[in-house]
Image (spheres, rainbow, N blue to C red):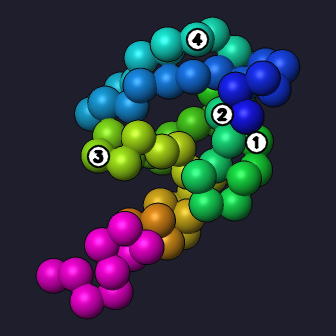
């Protein structure tokens, strides 16, 4: 996946991310959809993943933690 032209590599932190390898976009960890860097608003510093939107972020959290997480 790292060979996709324009794909950025980021290190996700809170409340920002650092660019490890420049590019124009990242891929959503849940849907695989392209997210332009200027549109990137959802990510997880814990899981080091980017998400297209709040639904994908929630889906990922539940996948990692399980539906019974409290």
Task: Tell me how far mark 3 sits from mark 1, CA to CA.
Answer: 21 Å
Residue 66 within the segment the image draws in magenta: yes
Visible residue check, residue 35: no
Q: Quadrant of residue 4?
A: top right
| Quarter holding residue 40 | top right
- Which badge, 1 or 2, comes first in the chain's sequence? 2
The tag on residue 21 is: 4
Percent across and percent down for residue 22 are: 63, 10
Q: Which residue is mark 1?
A: 34
- Residue matched to label 3: 46
Q: Would you say residue 12 is visible in this rendering?
A: yes
- Please state which of residues 6 and 14 is positioned toward the viewer in this rendering: 6
Answer few, some or many: residues within 10 Å of disc 2's Cα (few below 14, many 20 plus, some between 14 and 19).
Answer: many
Q: Residue 47, how many percent across, how many down?
A: 36, 48
Q: Sequence order check: which comes first, mark 1 or mark 4?
A: 4
Cβ atoms at labels 1 and 2 below 8 Å apart:
yes
**Number of callouts in the render?**
4
Image quarter of the N terminus: top right
Q: Secondary structure at mark 3?
A: loop
Using a 10 Å C-alpha cutoff, classify the residue at mark 4 as few (fewer than 14 neighbours), some (14 to 19) or many (20 or more).
few
Real-space Cα distance between discs 1 and 2? 6 Å
Earlier-in-chain disc, 4 versus 3: 4
Region in magenta = 62-70
Residue, far bottom: 68
């Amino acid at each position: 996946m790292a060979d996709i032209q324009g794909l950025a590599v980021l290190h996700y932190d809170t409340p920002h991310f650092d660019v490890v390898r420049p590019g124009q976009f990242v891929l959503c960890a849940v849907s695989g959809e392209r997210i332009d860097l200027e549109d990137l608003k959802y990510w997880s510093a814990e899981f080091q993943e980017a998400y297209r939107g709040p639904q994908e972020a929630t889906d990922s959290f539940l996948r990692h933690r399980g539906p019974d997480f409290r």
